């Protein structure tokens, strides 16, 4: 295995882990603690409040603590929390995790089996490219929409900032580009060895 292949494999594991952690944590959009906002933070699957109430709801219901975003208690504010663009971000994030997982699996199989090495290298490069593209779409949509008060009606949007989950998805997306490049380098070195 070439140095390119080993580097690509290590980067693929890092890409997968950062993507999984990004999707799992609730720190995608976070409110400044100093401003005592009723909205605390939101991830792709969980949201946290401190005595939050939506003024558009007739029955003033207050939400405190962290909630799974699809919990039945949040039905009245679901459209506010989970608009169509947010569902697209969730979908592309899941696609990114799945393609990152398959990238690692294909690379691992290629390292273990000589018969799978040839087709596995090309598949791993393609899968890392898919991971990068889905991650990029996810980051672009969330970055463009999350802080726009017209698209996302969270309280005091001027005091919200992008959190660690969003940053980890960016890191995973960038890493996938390096995985793709090193995998191509590994394939070209391997092809050069066959030509000699």
Image (cartoon, rainbow, N blue to C red):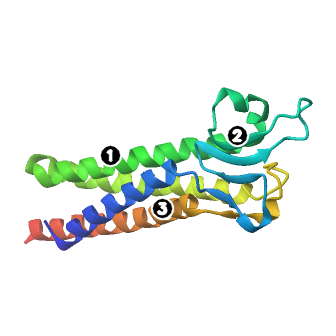
Q: CA distance from mark 3 to mark 1?
A: 15 Å
- Horizontal placement of 42 versus 150: left or right? left
Q: Could you say which is closer to the camera, residue 39 or residue 144?
A: 39
Q: Quadrant of residue 21?
A: bottom left
Please rate how many residues cluster around mark 1, counting C-alpha atoms within 10 Å: few if below 14, some from 14 to 19, many from 20.
some
Mark sitting on residue 82: 2
- Horizontal placement of 137 versus 34: left or right? left
Please indicate, yes or no, whether residue 62 appears anywhere in the rendered image: yes
Give the position of the N terminus as an image quadrant: bottom left
Are the residues flagged by discs 3 and 1 in contact, CB closer than 8 Å? no
Q: Position of residue 83 (x, y in %)?
A: 73, 40
* Residue at the disc numbered 1: 102
Q: CA distance from mark 3 to mark 2?
A: 23 Å
Q: Position of residue 106 (x, y in %)?
A: 25, 48
Q: Could you say which is closer to the camera, residue 56 or residue 119?
A: 56
Residue 178 position (above or below residue 50): below
Of mark 3 and mark 1, the one earlier in the sequence is: 1
* Residue at the disc numbered 3: 173
Q: Position of residue 160 (x, y in %)?
A: 74, 62
Give the position of the C terminus as an image quadrant: bottom left
Of mark 3 and mark 2, the one earlier in the sequence is: 2
Q: Secondary structure at mark 3?
A: helix
Identify the residue at horizontal 9%, vertical 51% (top origin): 114
């Amino acid at each position: 295995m070439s140095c390119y292949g080993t580097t690509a494999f290590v980067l693929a594991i890092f890409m997968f882990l950062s993507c999984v952690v990004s999707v799992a944590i609730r720190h995608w959009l976070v409110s400044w603690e100093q401003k005592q906002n009723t909205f605390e933070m939101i991830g792709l699957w969980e949201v946290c409040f401190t005595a939050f109430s939506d003024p558009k709801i007739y029955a003033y219901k207050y939400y405190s603590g962290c909630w799974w975003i699809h919990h039945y208690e949040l039905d009245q504010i679901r459209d506010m929390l989970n608009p169509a663009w947010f569902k697209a971000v969730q979908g592309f994030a899941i696609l990114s995790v799945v393609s990152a997982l398959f990238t690692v699996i294909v690379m691992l199989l290629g390292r273990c089996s000589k018969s799978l090495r040839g087709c596995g290298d090309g598949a791993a490069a393609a899968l890392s490219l898919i991971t990068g593209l889905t991650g990029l779409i996810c980051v672009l949509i969330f970055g463009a929409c999350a802080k726009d008060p017209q698209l996302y009606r969270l309280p005091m949007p001027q005091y919200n900032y992008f959190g660690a989950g969003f940053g980890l998805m960016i890191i995973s997306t960038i890493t996938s580009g390096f995985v793709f490049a090193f995998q191509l380098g590994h394939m070209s070195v391997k092809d050069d060895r066959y030509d000699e």
